[in-house]
Amino acid sequence: MKFDDAMLQRLEKLSMLKIEDEKREEMINELEKIVGFVEVLGELDTKGLDPSFRTLECGTPMREDIPNENAEIKKIIIENAPKVKDDYFVVPNIIE
């Protein structure tokens, strides 16, 4: 897959990140390398392999799900969010 500046701008918008002008070409090259690596993985012969392979015989170890009631943590997270409305994160639409 070939990346260009338009694709990088779209990724910036979706991720809510800003890439500096002097780093844009380097980022495009890195993204092309990453996608190229994933494409190579797609060429692997996986016939005969169990699709439900896992490293743990008994599955994922479970723990009790206990909510953290520390209000200070929520406040810190919300303060550092790029965009917030009514204590929720605001993210760009990805489905048109």
Image (spheres, grey):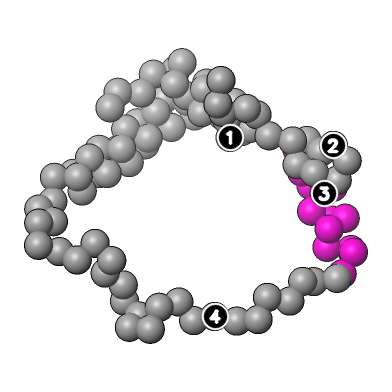
Most common secondary structure along the magenta stretch: helix
Q: Is residue 71 magenta?
A: yes
Spatial separation of the CA atoms under disc 1 and disc 2: 18 Å
Amino acid type shown at disc 1: Ser
Label of residue 15 in the image: 1
Q: At numbered mark 4, what does the secondary structure look like: helix, strand or loop?
A: loop
In the rendered structure, which disc, 1 or 3, sits on the residue that comes first in sequence? 1
Lower sequence index among marks 3 and 4: 4
| Label 2: how many Cα within 10 Å (few below 14, some 14–19, many 20+) | few
Q: Amino acid at mark 4?
A: Met
Pick whichever, 43 or 95, lies toward us.
Answer: 95
Could you tell which of marks 1 and 4 lies nearer the N-terminus?
1
Magenta region includes residue 14: no
* Quarter placement of the N terminus: top left
Q: Locate residue 7: give its quadrant.
A: top left
The amino acid at mark 3 is: Ile
Q: Residue drawn at (56%, 28%), measured in percent from left and top?
A: 94
Alpha carbon separation for disc pair 3 and 4: 28 Å
Residue occupying the point 80% across, 44% down: 88
The residue at 79%/53% (across/down) is 77
Residue 60 position (above or below residue 84): below
The answer to whether the residues at label 2 and label 3 have Cβ atoms under 8 Å apart is: no
- Residue at 33 percent across and 83 percent down: it is 57
Q: Which mark's residue is nearer the viewer, 2 or 3?
A: 2
Please state which of residues 41 and 30 is positioned toward the viewer in this rendering: 41
- Circle 3 residue: 78
Q: Is residue 65 above or below residue 41?
A: below
Residue 20 at least partly seen: no
The residue singled out by tag 4 in the image is 62
Q: Secondary structure at mark 1?
A: helix
Given residues 62 and 30, the one toward you in this image is 62
Distance (Cα) linking label 2 and label 3: 10 Å
